[in-house]
Every structure is written in C-alpha cells, then in structure tokens.
C-alpha cells in the first residue's frame, strides 16, 4: 500500500483473505467496495455503463463499484478473461475509459484481489499481462494453532471488524506513500536491480524474463520496506526481502512452471550483491 501497488492473494477458500482486505480498508479509513467475480460477471458490472435518460434525451454514465478507494476483487480467477481485463486500465493508468470518455480513479486507489488455486474447478488462469499489474503476490496460509483455537472457541471476527475504527485518514495514507517514495536508493542498488532483471532475461533457467515494470515494482517495494524499518536509505537486504513476493508471479521457468521459490532463489544466487 505504501508502494501505491496492488496485491494478489492466492490461497485456498476460508483462510481469511476477504476479512483481511476488509480490515485494511476499515483501518485506513478508505471507501470500500467488494466485487464478487463469477463466470457470468460482465465488464460493465465492474466499470459501469451509460443509461439513456428520457427526460434529458441523453445517456448518463452510472459508475460501477470500481470507483472507490479500496477494491476487493474476490475470487478474480472465477471470472472470464474478458471480465478480468476490465481491471487492467484502472490498475495501471488509474483511470477507465467508457465510450471515449475517461474517468479518473479515486486517490488513493488500491486493489486487493484474491484467487483460488488454479487446480480448483471453475477457474480461469490470469494472463501474464494481468499478473504483471500486481505489485506482489502473497499467500496467507493456515493460522497457527493458538489463533485457530480462538476461532474454534467462538471468537467472532466479524463483530470485531464492525467495531473497528480507522486509525489514519486517506490524506495521511497519501502522505505516507509520498514519504516512502522519497526513500533514497543509491546508484549501485539501482544497478543491482538492473542486473537481476538482465539475469532473468538471459539465463537459460527462465523462459520469460522480468519486465521494466517488475524492476519499478522492486524499487518501490524496497523503498517502502526500508521506510517501515525507519530508514532513509535502501539496503541490498531490502531488495532481497521483497523480491520473492514481487517476482514469483512474473517469472516463467523453462520447465513450464510459473514462478515458485526456486525461481526467486535462482535469481538471487545468480547475481552478486554490490
């Protein structure tokens, strides 16, 4: 969020992906919209559509749920590729175009998308162009034993969520994003990131290298990581800490598997630290 990026959470159903996104929206004081992706969802259901007004004899644009600060795209890979692509322009250009008219998105604008594992029934794999729009891909995993015991004993997470209040405003979040972006990155670290990108493009380990957008995501994420740690300068360790979450959904291995721990490990071991 400090990097002004979007997040993809991939995990099995029922581990709290939706609750996590809703909690963040509440604590950050942002307008929240949840879009449940299904096979019959249409792009107009996300963006909105023009409806004819008989009184004014004209078409009026009725905005869809995408026009909010915080968007939860729930089970995004259950929708068809045509519907998935409706998010592309909004996520990258922070705008949508409908019938030759461009509408800006809210500021800040954050998309958290959840998806079920690809082997489950009724899923449509996200294309590479869609995956590249997400700054990071994470997995929540199963809860630890102590917290799961609280859930089994009847802890009502939803009542806690309803009682939660915002701890910062949208304006304060925007200011924090600006501070994070001002974190200093020395020239050798920029060259280190360039070397990582170049290695992914030339190494026989990968069938598809990292794009310039991936490099920008690495820089922004490392800056935010250092900012959270209270530092004004980025260290190589910051880049290494965020690299797996930033690149694993972007790298394509020669054996046909998309990403994985082996991909990020090979990338880190193949390039020397400055």
Image (spheres, grey):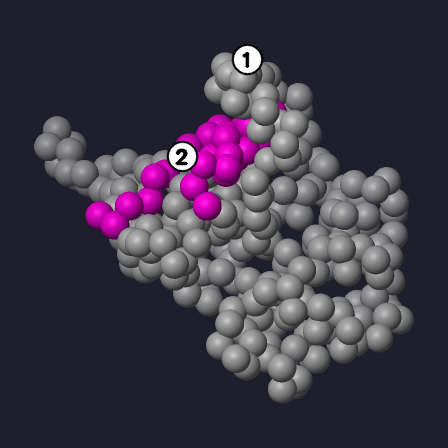
Between discs 1 and 2, the one toward the N terminus = 2
Q: Is residue 74 above or below residue 265?
A: above
| Mark 2: few/some/many CA within 10 Å (<14, 14-19, 20+) | some
Query: In this figure, which residue is indicated by the disc labeled 1?
Result: 163
- Give the magenta part as a residue range: 12-40
User: What secondary structure is found at the residue carrying circle 1?
Assistant: helix
Q: Are the residues at dot 1 and dot 2 in contact (C-beta closer than 8 Å)?
A: no
Question: From where the camera sits, is residue 244 visible?
Answer: yes
**Left or right relative to 200: residue 66:** left
**Residue drawn at point x = 43 percent, y = 41 percent:** 13
Q: Distance between the Cα atoms at labels 1 and 2?
A: 19 Å
**Residue drawn at point x = 87 percent, y = 52 percent:** 233
Query: In this figure, which residue is indicated by the disc labeled 2?
Result: 34
Residue 193, numbered label: none
Q: Residue furthest left?
A: 54
- The foreground one among 159 and 49 is 159
Magenta-span inclusion, residue 28: yes
Where is residue 263 drawn, in percent x and y?
64, 70
**Residue drawn at point x = 50 percent, y = 30 percent:** 19
**Residue drawn at point x = 67 percent, y = 60 percent:** 244
Q: How many badges with numbers are in the image?
A: 2
Where is residue 194 drawn, in percent x and y?
74, 73
Where is residue 213 drawn, in percent x and y?
60, 65
| Mark 1: few/some/many CA within 10 Å (<14, 14-19, 20+) | few
Magenta-span inclusion, residue 115: no
**Left or right relative to 40: residue 238:** right
Q: Quarter of the image containing the C terminus?
A: bottom right
């Amino acid at each position: 969020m400090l990097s002004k990026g979007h997040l993809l959470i991939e995990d099995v159903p029922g581990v709290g992906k939706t609750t996590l996104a809703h909690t963040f929206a509440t604590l950050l004081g942002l307008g929240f919209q949840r879009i449940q992706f299904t096979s019959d969802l249409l792009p107009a259901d996300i963006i909105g559509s023009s409806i004819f007004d008989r009184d004014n004899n004209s078409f009026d644009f009725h905005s869809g749920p995408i026009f909010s600060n915080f968007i939860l795209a729930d089970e995004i890979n259950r929708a068809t590729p045509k519907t998935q692509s409706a998010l592309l322009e909004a996520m990258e250009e922070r705008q949508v175009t409908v019938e030759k008219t461009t509408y800006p998105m809210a500021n800040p604008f954050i998309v958290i998308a959840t998806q079920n594992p690809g082997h489950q029934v009724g899923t449509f794999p996200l294309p590479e162009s869609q995956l590249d729009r997400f700054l990071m891909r994470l997995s929540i995993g199963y809860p630890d034993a102590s917290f799961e015991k609280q859930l089994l004993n009847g802890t009502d997470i939803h009542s806690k969520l309803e009682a939660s209040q915002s701890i910062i405003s949208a304006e304060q979040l925007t200011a924090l994003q600006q501070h994070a972006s001002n974190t200093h990155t020395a020239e050798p670290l920029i060259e280190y990131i360039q070397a990582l990108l170049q290695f992914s493009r030339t190494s026989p380990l990968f069938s598809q290298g990292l794009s310039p957008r991936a490099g920008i995501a690495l820089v922004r994420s490392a800056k935010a990581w250092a900012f959270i740690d209270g530092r004004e300068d980025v260290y190589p360790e910051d880049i290494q800490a965020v690299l797996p979450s930033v690149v694993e959904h972007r790298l394509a291995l020669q054996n046909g598997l998309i990403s994985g721990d082996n991909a990020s490990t090979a990338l880190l071991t193949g390039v020397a630290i400055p």
